[in-house]
């Protein structure tokens, strides 16, 4: 057995493939390093675009490495594969999750489900995509606060196999704006029409800051995707799900990355407007009492 092992190491074909593999890997690592260095030194490119190019370079290097090893060691792999026929089923079962992750990556790529920089939601995980590999994807958690959740902004890594069994909500596929909903609940005894007017006024004041860019974005969507004209003005829906409260649902288009900030601005403006109206009403009542 030892003689056979020594013979295999002294075999000319084996040594040729071994040196070819070492040379190929060295060349591949060198080229990948040069590409990465060139991307990092590239001026005038956004950090998100550089990060996307780095991910593409790394994944392309991995694919080229696998293809190169298959080509160099093809005859050895073929001889070895024949001996693995009996245990092929066991290998498939043992690598089921890995195969599903690879299939999930293929599905993501062919279906253009999401890319670096997109904001997605999958299996109750929500955030911006910052890294993609063949086996997993990485998100940085959305910074929007939510009830019963004290920590946000964490890095989330999930296996690509989730793509095969869960829908993906991509908030950036149609551009830089989304429709945000702001919920405000008031008592049924309060003046809901005054509250509705205050919400619409606050929303219109916010939209005025980016109205021109929003209109251009809507025209681009209509031209690119043949969509019907999209309303850009804020709207309020009234819901009576609660017996003791009226829920006002304000819908307005907002830029991605500014949803939480704009929601807070709208709520602050709404509360100021309501407080000012209450103060005016109280002053009017006091003036009426004095006159009496």
Image (cartoon, rainbow, N blue to C red):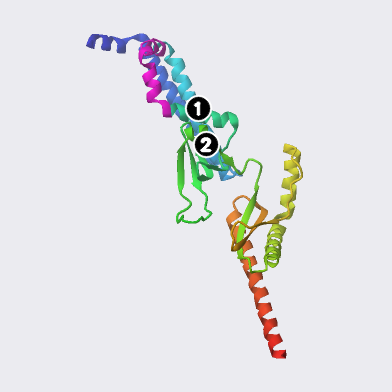
Q: Quadrant of the N terminus?
A: top left
* Residue closest to the far left: 2
Closest to the camera, between mark 1 and mark 2, is 2
Which quarter of the figure has residue 240? bottom right
Question: Eyeballing the image, is 80 above or below 46?
Answer: above
Q: Which residue is mark 2?
A: 166
Region of the chain picked out in magenta, as a range: 77-97
In this picture, residue 65 sits left or right of residue 196: left
Question: Eyeballing the image, is 48 above or below 63?
Answer: below
Element under disc 2: loop
Foreground residue, 38 or 129?
129
- Work out whether mark 1 precedes mark 2 in sequence or the reverse, and give the earlier one: 1
Question: Eyeballing the image, is 136 above or below 3?
Answer: below
Count residues near mark 1 (Cα–Cα under 10 Å), then give few for <14, some for 14-19, many for 20+.
some
Foreground residue, 292 or 148?
292
Q: Main secondary structure of the magenta part?
A: helix
Answer whether residue 90 is magenta in the image.
Answer: yes
Foreground residue, 18 or 248?
248
Q: Position of residue 128 (x, y in %)?
A: 54, 45
Q: Which residue is mark 1?
A: 103
Count residues near mark 2 (Cα–Cα under 10 Å), then give few for <14, some for 14-19, many for 20+.
few
Which quarter of the figure has residue 275? bottom right
Q: Position of residue 246 (x, y in %)?
A: 63, 61
Q: Is residue 58 visible?
A: yes
Please name the residue shown 43% across and 24% down the image: 25
Please name the residue shown 52% across and 34% down the image: 163
Element under disc 1: helix
Q: Position of residue 124 (x, y in %)?
A: 50, 44
Q: Quadrant of the C terminus?
A: bottom right
Gap in angstroms between the C-alphas marked 1 and 2? 14 Å
Which quarter of the figure has residue 282? bottom right
Q: Position of residue 265 (x, y in %)?
A: 62, 62
């Amino acid at each position: 057995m030892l003689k056979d092992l020594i013979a295999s190491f002294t075999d000319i074909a084996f040594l040729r493939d071994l040196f070819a593999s070492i040379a190929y890997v060295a060349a591949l690592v060198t080229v990948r390093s040069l590409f990465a260095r060139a991307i990092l030194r590239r001026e005038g490119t956004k950090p998100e675009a550089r990060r996307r190019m780095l991910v593409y370079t790394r994944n392309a290097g991995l694919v080229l490495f696998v293809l190169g090893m298959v080509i160099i060691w093809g005859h050895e792999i073929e001889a070895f594969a024949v001996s693995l026929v009996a245990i092929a089923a066991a290998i498939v079962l043992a690598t089921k999750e890995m195969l599903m992750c690879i299939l999930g990556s293929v599905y993501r790529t062919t279906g253009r489900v999401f890319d670096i920089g997109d904001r997605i939601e999958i299996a109750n995980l929500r955030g911006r995509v910052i890294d993609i590999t063949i086996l997993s994807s990485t998100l940085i958690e959305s910074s929007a606060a939510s009830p019963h959740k004290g920590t946000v902004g964490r890095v989330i890594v999930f296996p690509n196999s989730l793509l095969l069994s869960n829908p993906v909500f991509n908030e950036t596929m149609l551009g830089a704006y989304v429709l945000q909903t702001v919920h405000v609940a008031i008592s049924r005894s309060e003046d809901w029409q005054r509250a509705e007017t205050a919400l619409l006024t606050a929303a219109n004041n916010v939209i005025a800051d980016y109205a021109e860019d929003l209109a251009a974005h809507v025209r681009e969507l209509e031209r690119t995707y043949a969509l019907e004209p999209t309303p850009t003005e804020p709207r309020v829906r009234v819901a009576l799900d609660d017996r003791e409260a009226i829920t006002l649902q304000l819908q307005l288009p907002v830029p991605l990355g500014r949803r939480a900030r704009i929601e807070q601005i709208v709520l602050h403006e709404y509360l100021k407007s309501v407080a000012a109206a209450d103060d005016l009403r109280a002053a009017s009542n006091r003036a009426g009492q004095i006159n009496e």
